[in-house]
Amino acid sequence: MALRKSELQFCEWVFIDWQKKSLLIPGQLTKNKTDHLIPLTEEVIRLFKSLESITGDKAYIFCDEFEPKPFQIHTSIKNARNMLGHFAPHDIRRTVRSKWAQLGVQRDVAEMMLNHTPDILIQTYDQYDYLKEKREAYELWDTALGRLVG
């Protein structure tokens, strides 16, 4: 996943559908104000399940173990800048999008994975959700990440 920082920071446990293996970010949290349906790979589900034992009793997925409020992402960004020099959260989205292209993920599918708004003609005539293609792309990405971290 390559969520925007606010989508990540305010992501709640109730957004996960364990049966459908998906995460639905509601439109009120997204930049384009449209719901963002993300298929979850087995590895992501495993990671969420392990995190659930820490924050599962809180509303937010990413929060302090002892605080019910959302994780303060600004501290992590500051730490990344100290280690890497210039760094912005958008750098992660750009890098991930480029890697998806390298892996052969179709441009339209990758743009949907980022929840970018398609142009008006595509919105009008293409009503397909591409969930199958997004799931396949996330599986491909999951495999590539697995090779990187070994």
Image (spheres, rainbow, N blue to C red):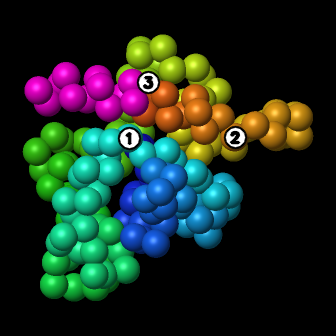
Find residue 67 and report its image quarter: bottom left
Find residue 75 and report its image quarter: bottom left
Amino acid carrying label 2: it is: Asp
Comes first in the chain, label 3 or label 2: 3
Q: Dots 1 and 2: beta carbons under 8 Å?
A: no
Comes first in the chain, label 1 or label 3: 1
Left or right position of 18 against 115: left
Amino acid carrying label 1: it is: Thr
Residue 90 position, x and y percent, is: 41, 44
Q: Is residue 70 above or below residue 66?
A: above
Q: Which residue is mark 3?
A: 100
Q: Residues within 10 Å of mark 3 (few under 14, many from 20)?
A: many
Q: Which residue is mark 1?
A: 41
The residue lying at 60 percent from left, 38 percent from top is 131
The answer to if 143 sits in the magenta stretch is yes
Q: Which residue is farthest front? A: 19
Total of numbered circles in the picture?
A: 3
Q: Which residue is mark 2?
A: 129
Q: Secondary structure at mark 2?
A: loop
Q: Is residue 70 above or below residue 95?
A: below
The residue range painted magenta reads 139-150
Q: Secondary structure at mark 1?
A: loop
User: Is residue 135 visible in the rendered structure shown here?
Assistant: yes
Q: Nearer the viewer, residue 23 or 67?
A: 23
Q: Nearer the viewer, residue 39 or 11?
A: 39
Q: Mark 1 and mark 3: span between their CA atoms?
A: 15 Å
Q: Dots 1 and 3: beta carbons under 8 Å?
A: no
Q: Mark 3 and mark 2: span between their CA atoms?
A: 19 Å
